[in-house]
Amino acid sequence: MKLHFSASSHDGAIERRARLIERYGQHEITDADCIVALGGDGHMLHVLHETLPHDKPVFGLNFGRLGFLMNHYASDELIERIRNAETAPVHPLRMHAETTDGAQYSALAINEVSLIRQMHNAAHIRVEVDGKHQVDELVCDGILLATPVGSTAYNLSAYGPVVPLGAGLMALTPISPFRPRRWRGALLNESAKVNLEVLEPEFRPVAASADSAEHRHIKTVSIAQAQDITLRLLYDQGYSLADRAIAEQFRT
């Protein structure tokens, strides 16, 4: 099996990458059968974005703190672990954003697309799902749409639900909502199309982020799952992403 190793900037990850290359060799991404990412969840997201055009499965080895998207680090029997690994197929979100000056941007998000206020003024956002106005004026710090993979990240810290992989759902979660006071978000079908309109964008500026790609002074954002793109994350048997998402809901 041909492997390509990628490491975060952490000294330990760089050192382990060198040892793994000495043991298993290093191949160009275009020739590799699998990409092995050493680091934390942030590095995994970076690798997935950077290698998206190559359509290669990615096996993560944890060298961060939480490492929800990673497997435990061990150098022994790595090829056998990869060959026996379970595949977690992931569809990213595709964001189209327009700014107040008419500029347009597109980006992919593996975790979430989020809108966040840029200054002290609360954001006022209109929420539309599949062409229907669902919330006419959400007064908040922001709002996000998360994939199942991203539901345990920023979405969870904003009190959004954990979405098991394969549930066919996305989580739409307000961030510090003030009005409507009782609305705490929604679970949407993975085929849903979400449009977010920033009200009074000049007076209440808002930034939009697709994972780490950020654009400011946003007027409108449209988000839908990119069904034409499938990322393949690999996990040790009995340690699948779906199992961990379920376990996360019972943490105290």
Image (cartoon, grey):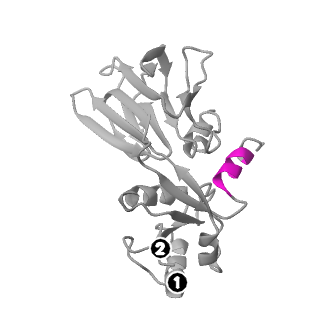
Query: Considering depth in this image, is 98 or 101 the residue closer to the camera?
Result: 98
Q: Is residue 83 visible?
A: yes
Q: Which residue is drawn at 64% across and 72% down?
A: 81
* Numbered label attached to residue 168: none
Q: How far apart are marks 2 and 1 (CA)?
A: 10 Å
Tell whether 249 sits left or right of 199.
right
User: Residue 24 bears which disc, if any?
Assistant: 1
Residue 114 or 200: which is nearer the viewer?
114
Decide: few, some or many residues near mark 1? Use Cα within 10 Å; few <14, some 14-19, many ≥20: some
Return the residue nearer the eye: 202 or 67.
67
Disc 1 marks a residue whose amino acid type is Tyr
- Residue 227: % across, % down: 44, 42
What is the count of numbered marks?
2
Percent coordinates x, y for residue 162 in the rendering? 65, 39
What residue do we see at 52% from left, 34% from top?
190
Q: Does the magenta stretch include residue 225?
A: no
Asked if the residue at tag 1 contacts the one at tag 2, i.e. Cβ–Cβ closer than 8 Å, the answer is yes
Find residue 184 and report its image quarter: top right
Describe residue 225's horizontal placement relative to residue 30 as left or right.
Answer: right
Residue wearing tag 2? 5
Dot 2 amino acid type: Phe
The majority secondary structure of the magenta stretch comes to helix
Q: Quadrant of the C terminus?
A: top right
Rendering coords of residue 198 (x, y %) = 37, 22
**Label 2 CA crowd tier, 10 Å (few <14, some 14–19, many 20+):** many
Residue 5 spot, x, y in % from top left: 47, 73
- Residue at the farthest bottom position: 22
Does residue 65 lie above or below 192 as drawn?
Answer: below
Q: What stretch is highlighted in magenta?
A: 240-247
Element class at badge 1: helix
Mark nearer the N terminus (2 vs 1)? 2
Residue 244 in the magenta stretch? The answer is: yes
